[in-house]
Image: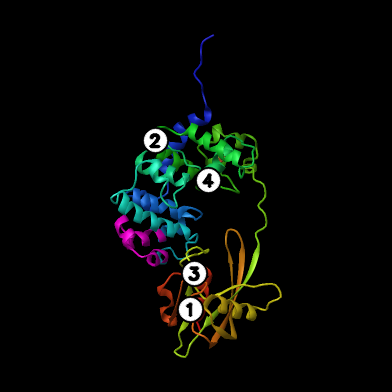
Amino acid sequence: MKNTPPFNPIENRIKTNLLPWFETNQRAMPWRNNRTPYRIWISELMLQQTRVDQVIPYFNRFMKRFPSLKSLAAASQEEVLKQWEGLGYYSRARNLHKAAKIIATDHKGRFPKTAEEMIKLPGIGSYTVAAIGSLAFNLNLAVLDGNVIRVLSRLFAYNTDTRSTVAKKELQQLADDLLIKGDAGNFNEAMMELGATICLPKNPQCEVCPMIPACLGHKSGQPSHYPVKTPKKKVPHIVVGAAVVTNRKGEVLIAQRREKDRLGGLWEFPGGKLEPRETIQQCIARELKEELGINTEIGDFLVTVKHAYSHFTMEMHTYFAKIKSGHPRPIECQNHRWVKISDLRNVPYSKADLKIIAELENL
Ligand code: SF4
């Protein structure tokens, strides 16, 4: 019997259908012009957990302020956080700043070209290495992000829980096997673009999908069944009290969160988590004593701010307060400052604190 060469319809359709589709249908994005390792790195970090339309204005603003790796390395952490303000997951900004300093000193300002060197930098994991490596240096590395996981699970009608470690390994292997050697950047971007624009989480647009002839998920009649995922646990809800402490000059007291804490390096209106059997006012008074060493009188209510983070939801009840005794000193924060309301926006905050600022500006 004549030997037939191995034939993988999915691999075949990636070459004949997906790549040409990507060539003509890819969306315009600022980081797709003038592709330098620096611009690719910043865009990849910003795009983690964040939608493209949200990232574009941040990316453009960031590039204007820090056009080169050198300018980023020379900036203060506060300046970098200010540019990142509102984008969330602030460890990304702190890490990219640390990494820029390392590249400036240890790599003569040039982005390292090998996966082994890249992975040593803060904030760069295997996904980012594959993205930067393939797009900037044409390394044969396949990315596996949420979009690629969804596309692969549907193409192969993959039935294992994609949150499991075994699935991550198997899907990475599938992506590695399908990768078009020598054209890894295009392959990766095409897979991600298909997931972001056609193979959508709830309503896959199979009728216009270039992969339809080979897709087992579509053939199953239930593409949305994939990727298989165990339901997420319900996220906890926390209640927080915060204070707008004012002085006689009409200034407001703000505190900078410690580096090691969540949202480290950002500024905030001091306060903290409500404890059992405490009123919000008692919580605020206790937190101000613990955080800044001041005894306060809690005054009028200002606003309740609600915010959803990835691992919990929060409601923050904010009151005005005045100091009864003591001088603020940083005990459970790394810095504090009295500022005029008109100067509040000079330093970086989380989204929740920005909502309090907006409320103060409207008084
Ligand atoms: S055919 Fe449908 S399910 Fe399959 S990859 Fe395309 S959009 Fe996704």
Q: Is residue 91 left or right of residue 224?
A: left
The residue drawn where x is 49% and y is 84% is: 327
Q: Which residue is mark 2?
A: 183
Q: Which residue is mark 3?
A: 257
Q: Give the Cα separation between the discs numbered 4 and 2.
A: 19 Å
Foreground: disc 1 or disc 4:
1
Q: Mark 3 near ligand 1 (CB under 8 Å)? A: no
Q: Which residue is mark 4?
A: 147
Q: Secondary structure at mark 4?
A: helix
The vertical placement of 321 against 287, above or below, is: below
Quadrant hosting residue 166: top right
User: Quadrant location of ligand 1?
Assistant: top right
Q: The disc labelled 3 sits on which kind of residue? A: Arg
Q: Which badge, 1 or 4, comes first in the chain's sequence?
A: 4
Foreground: disc 3 or disc 4:
3
Magenta segment's dominant SS is helix
Q: The disc labelled 2 sits on which kind of residue? A: Asp
Q: Which badge, 3 or 1, comes first in the chain's sequence?
A: 3
Seen from this angle, which residue lies furthest right? 277
Q: Position of residue 231 (x, y in %)?
A: 67, 50
Label 4 close to label 2 by CB (< 8 Å): no
Q: The disc labelled 4 sits on which kind of residue? A: Asn
Label 3 close to label 4 by CB (< 8 Å): no
Q: Which residue is mark 1?
A: 329
Q: Which badge, 4 or 2, comes first in the chain's sequence?
A: 4
Foreground: disc 2 or disc 1:
1
Q: Which badge, 2 or 1, comes first in the chain's sequence?
A: 2
